Amino acid sequence: MVEPTGPLAEADWQAHRPAVFGAAYRILGSVAEAEDVTQEVWLRASAAGLSEVRDLRAWLVTLAARTSYNVLGSARVRRESYVGP
């Protein structure tokens, strides 16, 4: 359980970072994009109020998955809008 006083502690993040990166990498298939998603999750989690979170690992991995799917969706739109030569 996360301490109810606020932001994500560094120790908590280091414990769950591999799971966040792994989820993003399995969805995206790219180390660079997975690192970007991992950093985005860190920024969102550090700014979020985590007092209501029961399972921090599950919450972080879910956030990583949703962010990864958003990245995939925007990449598909970029590919579809390419006019080409």
Image (tube, grey):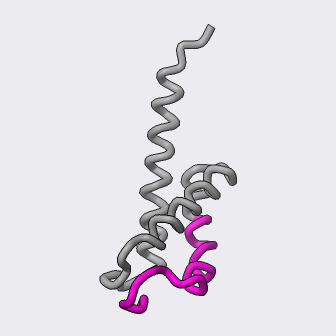
* Span highlighted in magenta in the image: 1-22
What is the x, y in percent for residue 11? 60, 86
Q: Answer with the quarter of the image where residue 22 lies.
A: bottom right
Q: Between 71 and 45, which is closer to the camera in this rendering?
A: 45
Give x and y (percent) for residue 29.
Answer: 63, 50
Between 65 and 52, the residue placed more toward the observer is 52
Q: Residue at x 62, y 80 (%)?
A: 14
Pick out the residue farthest to the top: 85
Q: Is residue 50 above or below residue 79?
A: below
Instruction: State the residue lying farthest toward the right.
Output: 31
Residue depicted at 51% across the width and 65% down the height: 43
Q: Position of residue 62 (x, y in %)?
A: 43, 66
Is residue 20 placed above or below 51 in the rendered structure? above
| 39 with respect to 80 (left or right) | right
Q: Give the number of marks.
A: 0
Q: Which residue corresponds to the image point at 63% horizontal and 72% vertical from the top-left? A: 18
- Residue 66: x percent and y percent? 42, 57
- 15 lies above or below 73: below
Instruction: Give yes or no for residue 20 being in the magenta stretch.
Output: yes
Quarter of the image containing the C terminus?
A: top right
Q: Is residue 59 magenta?
A: no
Task: Name the image quarter holding the N terminus.
Answer: bottom left
Task: Tell me the residue at 41%/92% (across/down).
Answer: 3
